[in-house]
Image (cartoon, rainbow, N blue to C red):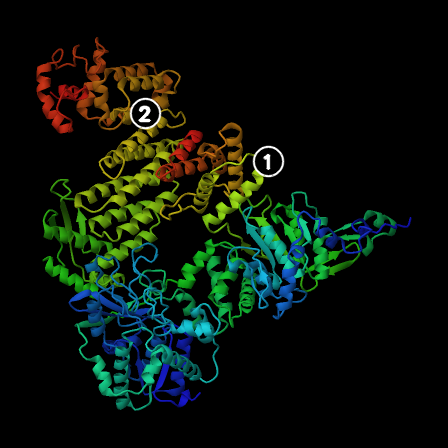
C-alpha cells in the first residue's frame, strides 16, 4: 500500500459515484496538489472559472458542438456528486490550476462524424460525453444521441417508446470502460467491473462497486482506496489489455502527454482525477514519440464549448438522454447526507408521502429503517442500499402497494433537480442553429412588431412557418399566429413577429432540449406529451406537431394520446378531443405526413365515444344536456370527416355511429334536446327517412309528453341555423309543430316559451318570415310533401314544378355532389334547387 | 367431583404413543408442510451455518432457500415452494426476523396461505398454530377460552384456561398464523393490537399475563381486492409489514394453472373431456389478464380496468362453467359461446361502469384481433 508515496497522484474514480467523490475530496485535502488534472475535453479549460460562479448549480454539463453543425455535439454531464465536479470545485476554491486532459472535443466530434452513429468504437467510453450525432440529419428525434463508447446505438431499446436512443452508460460507467457489454455482437469487450464483482461473488457489478467503494464509510488513509482500485485495475488490464475499447490507447496517449506537460509546469505535485480504468495506462511508462505517433492524423473539426444546465432526470437512465445512473437522487442524497444516510433517506421519504396525504408516522420510519438494515444483513451487504430501502418502504410505508412507491421513485430516487448556468456562459448551439436558420430563411429578428403573411405553398414560406411553430413549442414566442385576413384557406398563415430581448434567454433555456431547433422542439413536444394532464392538451399538441412538422415526436404523442383516451372515463373529454384530432388528420393528409397511426388513434377514440355516449346521456340537467348536444354535433362532424381517411373503415364507422344515434334517439332517459338532435342528424345523413322522422316527432309532440320535454326535443331537432329550412321545406313537420304549439295548455306555455324563442330566434330573418307566412296560410292543400311534383307552393312561386328547368341544373348539381352522372334517385337535390331557383 | 378426563386425551389415540400430529401425517389427506418436506428441512438445518434468530429452526437465509428452492452444498435439491419474485420472500422472511408482524395480501389464488404455512414450518417447524378468520371468529380464538368444567370445579386457574393458538405461539416463541384477517370482526381484530405492540397478553381473571417469548411472530393473510368486510384499522395496520403476492407473471404460467385446475375439477364433476379446450382457455386467460392489467398483451393499447377481481380462480370457474355448458347443451367441444356468458358475468360486476369498459374492450380490442371473430360475435350476442 505504497499508494500515498507514488507521484503523480492518480485518483481512479467511478463517474457519478458519490463514494468516489468523497474519496477524491479527502485525498485532495490531504495532499494539496499544485494542479488538478481532470478527465474531460481540454477546450473546457477556459470555462473552469465559471464553475465557481455564484449562479452555477449542478447538475450541469459541458457541451461541445461543431461550429458549423450544431447538431453534432457531445455532453459531459456533471452532478453535485460527480468526482470530477468535486475536484473542479476544490481546485477553483483553492486557487489551484485545473487542466482537462482527455482527447479534445475537436477530435471527438470529428471522429463521431466520421464513424457515423452506427459504427462501434466511438472515442469516449468513460467520462462519457453523451454524443449527439446530428439527429436532425438522421431524422432522429432527440438531438443528442448517446452512443455508448463502442456500442452500436441502442435505439429503440425500450426507452419509453419515445424512439430515443438507449441510455448512456458512458458517463456513468462504473469505471472507465466498465460499461457492461450489452452488445452481443461484440464478443471481446470486457466489463472489468463484472470480472471483479464475479471474483467477489456478486452477480451485479454495480452493486459490488457500491458495496466496496460507494458505501464504504469514511476514515482511514484517504489514499488507500485509490491504491486498491489501481491495483485491481492494473491486474485487469494486464489480462484484458484495452478490453475492446479501441479508442482507449489514443485517449490515454493524449492524457499521458498532458500529464507530462503538467508535471513539467507544476512538478510532481499534481493530482489526476480520471476513470479508474485509465489509471494503469497513465502510470505506464512510454515515450513521448510513441504517444505522439498514436495521435497523428486525427481528424479535427472546429468546436465551441459551453456549460448547459442539466437535470437529474436526464442523468437517469429513464430518459433517453441519460448519462446512465438510474438513481441520481439517491446518489445525491448519499453524497450530501452528513451521516446516517438510511435514516435521513427514510425521513425524506416519509416527508414526501405525508405531503401527499398518506399517513406515515415516525414509527413507520423507524420500522422501515430496521427492515432495510435487516434485509441488508440477510442479503449480506455492508449497508442498506437502494434496493433494500425500496423494499422496506414498500412493505412498511406503502402497505405493499407500488403506486406511492412510483412517487418516491419519481420525486426522490430520480428527483427533479434542475441545474443552473450563469448567464455569462457562452451561447448554446441552439442559438447558433437558430441564427443560421434565420439567415437562410431571410427572417431577421427585429424588435419592431410587424405582420408576416405566409403562403404555405411556397417552399421558403412553409419553412418559415415551421420554424415559428417550432419556436412556439419551445416557448420562444417570437411570432404569434393571428387570424388570417386572406380568408380561411389552409395554405395561408399570418404571424405577428416581435423579437424581445428576453427571447435570447428563452433560447438559452431551451438549449436543454437539444442543439438544433428541430431536435429541441421534438424533445420538448415528447416531454410535454408525457407531462400533459388533460386529453385535450395532448390533442392540441398533436396538432402543433403537425404544424411544426415534427414527425419524430408524433409516435410518442400518439402513444400518450391513445393511453389517455383509453383511461379517460369522461365521454365529454373524449368528444372534445376527437374533432381536433380529425382536423389534425386532415391537415396532415394535406401535408403528406404519414398519418396512419393518427388515423388508428382517431378511430379508436371514436369507438370509445360510441360505447360511452349513450350511458353518459342520462340524467343531465339543461346546461349539461346543451353541452352534450354540442359534443354530439362535433363528433358527428368528425365522423363525417373521418370517413374520408383511407386507413379507417369509413362504412363500418358511420354505421356504428348511426347505431349510437338511433339508440340515443330512442332512449327515454336522455334529455329531449339530445333525442331530437339524434333524429335530426340521422335524417341529415339519410339514415332515417322523413316519414320516420315525422313519426318520431309526432310521438314526442303527442299529449303524453310534457311540454318542456317536447320543446327541448324541438330545439334539438330543428335548432341551429339550418333547422328553419327543414321546417320551411317539410310542411308535415311544420304542421306537427304548429298543432302541438296550439295544443299546449296556457299554464305550460310560459314554461316552454323561452325554449321556443331560443330555437326560433336562431333562424335567419328570411327563414323566420317564410315560416310565419307558411303558418299564416295554414296547412297546404296537397300536404306539401317534399318532392311532390304538383300542388300549391309558397307565395311568390308558381304552381307546380317546371321540370324542364329543374333538369337543366341536374348535371351541375351532380358535379358538385360528386355523384355519378345519370338519373339521381334522390329527390332532395332537385328539391333544394327548386327552392333556390 | 374429580375431573379425570384430561382435555388432551381426546386427541391422543390410546394405541399410539407418538404425538397426535405425527400419527395423522401419513393418513392425512393433505399432510402439513413440516411433515411433507421434513427431509428438506432437515438437510437445510444440517447445512445451515448462518446465525439463527432466537428459537428459529433455520437462519433467515435458509428459510428463503426453503421457499425459493435451490441446491445445497451436499447436493440436496430443495424444491421451490413459491414461484415468484425473490424479493417478496426475502422481505417476508426478514420481517419475521424483526418484531413486526407480516401481512400477506393478494387476490384469491395467489398462494398466500401456502406461503404462510411454509414460512411457519420453516421458521418454527410447526405450521399448525392457526386461527381461521371468519365473520364469526370470537375473541377466544385469538386470546384464550375456558374449560368450563374445570372452571366450575376449581375456579379460575391456569389449568382451566384453554389457550388460543396465538397464546401458545407467544409462550413457546413460535410463529402463529391468522387466515383471512379482514374477515374477522373489527372488535376481535383489535385484540391483536396489544399482542403485536406490547407482546403481551393479559389474563385479568387470574391477574397474570403471558409474555411473548423471543421468536414469536404472526403471519396474517388477507384478500386485498375486496378486502373482506372489515378493513384493518390503521392502528393494527401499522403493526404489520405488508407484502403483496402478485398474480402469475407470464400468460403461459397462468394458462398452465388454469388448465390443470380445470382438468382436476372436470374429473371430479364427471364432465366429459373436451378436446381442444386449450385455445379457449388461452383466450379466457388472455381476456382476464388484459383487463386486469389494463394493457393488451402486445403492450400497445391501454384499457380500463373493471371492478371485478378477475383472478386466476375466476378464470378457472369460467372455463369449468363453459365445459359444463358444452357438455350438457352443446356438442361437447368448448366453444367461444360457452365461455362468453361466463366472462361477461365475471367482468361486469358493476352494471353501469363495467359494462362500458367491457364494450370498449370488445370494440377496440377484440373486434380487430385475428381469429377472434367467433368470440367477438358470441360476446356481442350475450352483451346485447
Residue pictured at 79% horizontal, 58% vertical: B207
Horizontal side, residue A518 vs residue B264: left or right: left
- Residue sitting farthest toward the right: B1
**Which residue is labeled 1 in the image?**
B269
Residues under numbered marks 1 and 2 in contact, where contact means CB atoms less than 8 Å apart: no
Q: Nearer the viewer, mark 1 or mark 2?
A: 1
Tell me the quarter of the image containing the C terminus of chain A.
top left
Q: In this view of the protein, which residue sits in the foreground, A496 or A808?
A: A808
Q: Quadrant of residue A485?
A: top left
B155 or B214: nearer the viewer:
B214
- Are labels 1 and 2 assigned to the same chain? no
Q: Identify the disc placed on residue A580.
A: none
User: Helix or strand or loop: what does disc 2 sit on?
Assistant: helix
Counting other residues with Cα less than 10 Å from the Cα at mark 2, is it few (<14), some (14-19), or many (20 or more)? Answer: many
Q: Is residue A426 visible?
A: no
Residue A319's spot in the image, x, y percent? 34, 60
Which quarter shows the N terminus of chain A? bottom left
Q: Quadrant of residue A575?
A: top left
Q: Which residue is mark 2?
A: A676
Count numbered badges in the picture. 2
Image mark 1: chain: B
Q: Position of residue A165 (x, y in %)?
A: 30, 60
Residue B181, image x, y percentages = 62, 49
Q: Quadrant of residue A75?
A: bottom left
For numbered disc 1, what is the local secondary structure? loop
Query: What is the residue that sits farthest to the top in this orientation?
Result: A781
Instruction: Tell me the crowding category of disc 1: few under 14, some 14 to 19, or many 20 or more residues within 10 angstroms, Cα based.
Output: few
Q: Is residue B350 left or right of residue A234?
A: right
Mark 1–mark 2 distance (CA, rounded to whole Å): 55 Å
Image coordinates for residue A820, horizontal then vertical, percent: 14, 26
Q: Chain of mark 2?
A: A
Residue A484 visible here = yes
Amino acid at each position: 500500500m505504497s499508494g500515498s508515496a507514488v507521484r503523480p497522484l492518480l485518483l481512479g474514480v467511478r463517474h457519478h459515484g458519490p463514494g468516489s467523490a468523497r474519496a477524491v475530496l479527502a485525498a485532495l485535502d490531504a495532499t494539496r496538489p499544485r494542479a488538478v488534472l481532470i478527465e474531460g475535453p481540454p477546450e473546457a479549460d477556459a470555462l473552469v472559472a465559471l464553475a465557481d460562479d455564484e449562479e452555477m448549480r449542478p447538475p450541469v454539463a459541458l457541451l461541445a458542438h461543431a461550429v458549423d453543425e450544431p447538431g453534432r455535439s457531445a455532453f459531459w454531464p456533471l452532478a453535485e456528486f460527480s468526482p470530477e465536479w468535486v475536484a473542479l470545485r476544490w481546485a477553483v476554491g483553492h486557487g489551484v490550476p485545473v487542466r482537462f486532459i482527455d482527447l479534445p472535443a475537436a477530435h471527438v466530434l470529428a471522429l463521431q462524424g466520421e464513424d457515423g452513429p452506427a459504427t462501434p468504437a466511438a472515442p469516449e467510453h468513460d467520462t462519457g460525453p453523451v454524443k449527439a450525432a446530428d439527429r436532425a440529419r438522421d431524422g432522429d428525434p432527440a438531438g443528442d444521441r448517446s452512443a455508448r463508447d463502442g456500442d452500436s446505438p441502442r435505439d429503440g431499446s425500450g426507452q419509453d417508446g419515445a424512439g430515443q436512443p438507449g441510455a448512456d452508460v458512458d458517463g456513468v460507467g462504473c469505471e472507465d470502460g466498465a460499461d457492461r457489454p450489452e452488445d452481443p455482437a461484440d464478443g471481446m469487450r470486457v466489463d472489468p467491473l463484472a470480472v471483479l464483482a464475479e471474483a467477489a461473488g456478486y452477480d451485479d457489478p454495480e452493486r459490488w462497486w457500491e458495496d466496496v467503494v460507494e458505501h464504504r464509510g469514511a476514515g482511514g488513509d484517504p489514499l488507500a482506496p485509490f491504491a486498491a482500485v489501481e491495483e485491481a485495475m492494473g491486474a485487469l488490464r494486464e489480462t484484458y489489455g484495452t478490453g475492446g475499447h479501441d479508442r482507449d490507447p489514443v485517449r490515454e496517449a493524449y492524457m499521458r502527454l498532458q500529464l507530462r506537460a503538467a508535471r513539467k509546469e507544476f512538478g510532481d505535485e499534481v493530482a489526476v482525477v480520471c476513470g479508474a480504468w485509465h489509471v494503469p495506462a497513465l502510470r505506464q511508462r512510454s515515450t513521448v514519440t510513441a504517444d505522439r505517433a498514436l495521435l497523428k492524423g486525427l481528424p479535427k473539426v472546429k468546436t465551441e464549448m459551453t456549460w448547459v444546465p442539466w437535470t437529474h432526470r436526464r442523468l437517469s437512465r429513464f430518459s433517453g438522454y441519460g448519462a446512465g445512473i438510474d438513481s441520481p437522487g439517491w446518489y445525491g442524497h448519499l453524497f450530501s447526507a452528513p451521516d446516517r444516510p438510511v435514516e435521513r433517506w427514510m425521513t425524506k421519504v416519509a416527508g414526501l408521502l405525508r405531503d401527499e396525504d398518506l399517513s406515515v408516522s415516525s414509527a413507520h420510519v423507524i420500522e422501515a429503517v430496521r427492515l432495510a438494515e435487516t434485509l441488508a444483513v440477510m442479503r449480506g451487504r455492508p449497508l442498506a442500499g437502494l434496493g433494500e430501502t425500496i423494499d422496506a418502504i414498500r412493505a412498511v410505508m406503502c402497505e405493499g402497494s407500488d403506486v406511492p412507491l412510483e412517487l418516491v421513485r419519481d420525486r426522490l430516487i430520480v428527483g427533479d433537480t434542475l441545474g443552473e448556468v450563469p448567464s455569462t456562459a457562452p451561447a448554446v448551439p441552439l442559438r447558433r442553429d437558430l441564427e443560421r436558420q434565420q439567415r437562410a430563411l431571410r427572417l431577421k429578428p427585429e424588435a419592431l412588431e410587424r405582420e408576416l403573411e405566409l403562403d404555405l405553398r411556397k417552399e421558403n414560406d412553409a419553412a418559415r412557418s415551421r420554424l415559428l411553430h417550432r419556436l412556439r413549442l419551445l416557448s420562444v414566442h417570437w411570432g404569434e399566429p393571428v387570424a388570417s385576413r386572406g380568408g380561411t384557406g389552409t395554405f395561408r398563415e399570418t404571424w405577428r413577429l416581435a423579437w424581445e430581448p428576453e427571447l435570447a434567454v428563452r433560447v438559452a433555456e431551451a438549449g436543454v432540449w437539444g442543439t438544433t431547433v428541430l431536435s429541441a422542439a421534438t424533445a420538448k413536444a415528447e416531454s410535454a406529451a408525457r407531462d400533459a394532464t388533460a386529453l385535450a392538451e395532448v390533442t392540441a399538441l398533436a396538432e402543433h406537431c403537425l404544424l411544426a412538422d415534427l414527425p419524430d415526436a408524433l409516435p410518442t404523442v400518439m402513444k400518450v394520446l391513445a393511453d389517455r383516451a383509453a383511461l379517460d372515463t369522461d365521454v365529454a373529454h373524449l368528444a372534445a378531443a376527437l374533432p381536433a384530432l380529425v382536423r389534425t388528420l386532415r391537415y396532415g393528409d394535406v401535408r403528406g405526413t404519414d398519418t396512419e397511426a393518427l388515423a388508428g388513434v382517431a378511430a379508436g377514440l371514436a369507438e370509445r365515444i360510441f360505447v360511452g355516449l349513450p350511458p353518459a346521456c342520462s340524467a343531465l340537467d339543461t346546461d349539461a344536456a346543451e353541452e352534450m348536444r354540442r359534443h354530439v354535433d362535433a363528433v358527428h362532424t368528425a365522423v363525417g370527416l373521418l370517413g374520408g381517411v383511407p386507413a379507417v373503415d369509413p362504412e363500418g364507422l358511420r354505421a356504428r355511429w348511426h347505431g349510437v344515434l338511433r339508440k340515443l334517439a330512442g332512449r327515454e332517459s336522455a334529455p329531449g334536446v339530445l333525442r331530437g338532435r339524434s333524429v335530426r342528424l340521422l335524417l341529415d345523413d339519410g339514415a332515417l327517412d322523413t316519414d320516420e322522422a315525422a313519426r318520431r316527432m309526432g310521438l314526442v309532440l303527442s299529449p303524453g309528453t310534457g311540454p318542456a320535454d317536447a320543446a327541448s326535443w324541438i330545439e334539438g331537432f330543428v335548432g341551429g341555423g339550418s333547422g328553419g329550412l327543414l321546417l320551411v321545406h317539410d310542411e308535415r313537420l311544420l304542421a306537427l309543430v304548429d298543432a302541438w304549439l296550439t295544443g299546449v295548455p296556457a299554464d305550460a306555455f310560459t314554461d316552454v316559451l323561452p325554449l321556443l324563442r331560443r330555437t326560433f330566434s336562431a333562424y335567419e330573418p328570411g327563414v323566420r318570415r317564410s315560416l310565419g307566412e307558411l303558418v299564416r296560410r295554414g296547412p297546404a292543400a296537397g300536404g306539401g310533401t317534399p318532392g311532390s311534383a304538383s300542388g300549391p307552393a309558397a307565395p311568390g312561386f308558381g304552381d307546380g314544378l317546371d321540370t324542364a328547368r329543374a333538369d337543366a341544373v341536374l348535371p351541375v348539381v351532380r358535379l358538385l355532389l360528386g355523384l355519378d352522372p345519370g338519373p339521381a334517385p334522390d329527390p332532395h337535390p332537385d328539391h333544394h334547387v327548386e327552392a333556390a331557383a | 367431583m374429580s375431573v379425570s378426563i384430561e382435555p388432551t386425551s381426546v386427541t391422543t389415540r390410546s394405541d399410539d404413543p407418538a404425538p397426535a400430529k405425527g400419527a395423522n401425517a401419513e393418513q392425512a389427506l393433505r399432510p402439513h408442510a413440516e411433515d411433507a418436506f421434513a427431509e428438506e428441512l432437515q438437510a437445510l438445518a444440517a447445512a445451515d451455518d448462518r446465525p439463527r434468530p432466537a428459537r428459529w429452526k433455520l437462519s433467515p437465509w435458509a428459510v428463503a432457500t426453503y421457499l425459493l428452492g435451490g441446491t445445497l452444498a451436499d447436493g440436496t435439491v430443495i424444491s421451490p415452494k413459491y414461484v415468484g419474485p425473490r424479493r417478496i420472500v426475502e422481505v417476508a422472511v426478514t420481517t419475521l426476523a424483526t418484531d413486526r408482524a407480516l401481512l400477506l395480501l393478494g387476490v384469491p389464488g395467489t398462494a398466500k396461505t401456502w406461503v404462510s404455512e411454509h414460512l411457519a414450518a420453516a421458521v418454527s417447524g410447526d405450521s399448525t398454530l392457526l386461527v381461521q378468520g371468519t365473520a364469526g371468529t370470537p375473541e377466544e380464538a385469538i386470546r384464550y377460552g375456558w374449560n368450563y368444567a374445570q372452571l366450575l370445579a376449581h375456579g379460575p386457574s391456569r389449568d382451566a384456561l384453554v389457550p388460543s393458538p396465538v397464546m401458545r405461539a407467544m409462550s413457546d416463541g413460535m410463529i402463529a398464523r391468522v387466515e383471512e384477517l379482514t374477515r374477522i370482526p373489527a372488535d376481535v381484530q383489535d385484540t391483536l393490537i396489544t399482542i403485536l405492540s406490547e407482546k403481551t397478553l393479559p389474563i385479568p381473571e387470574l391477574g397474570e399475563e403471558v409474555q411473548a417469548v423471543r421468536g414469536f411472530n404472526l403471519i396474517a393473510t388477507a384478500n386485498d381486492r375486496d378486502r373482506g368486510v372489515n378493513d384493518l384499522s390503521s392502528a393494527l395496520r401499522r403493526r404489520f409489514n405488508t407484502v403483496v403476492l402478485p398474480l402469475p407473471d407470464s400468460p403461459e404460467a397462468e394458462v398452465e394453472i388454469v388448465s390443470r385446475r380445470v382438468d382436476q375439477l372436470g374429473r371430479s364433476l364427471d364432465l366429459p373431456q373436451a378436446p381442444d379446450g386449450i385455445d379457449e382457455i388461452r383466450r379466457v386467460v388472455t381476456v382476464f389478464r388484459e383487463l386486469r392489467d389494463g394493457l393488451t398483451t402486445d403492450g400497445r393499447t391501454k384499457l380500463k380496468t373493471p371492478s371485478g377481481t378477475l383472478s386466476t380462480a375466476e378464470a378457472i370457474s369460467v372455463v369449468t362453467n363453459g365445459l359444463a355448458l358444452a357438455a350438457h347443451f352443446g356438442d361437447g367441444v368448448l366453444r367461444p359461446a360457452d365461455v362468453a356468458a361466463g366472462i361477461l358475468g365475471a367482468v361486469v360486476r358493476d352494471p353501469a361502469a363495467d359494462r362500458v369498459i367491457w364494450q370498449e374492450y370488445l370494440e377496440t380490442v377484440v373486434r380487430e384481433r385475428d381469429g377472434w371473430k367467433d368470440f367477438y360475435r358470441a360476446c356481442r350476442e350475450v352483451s346485447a
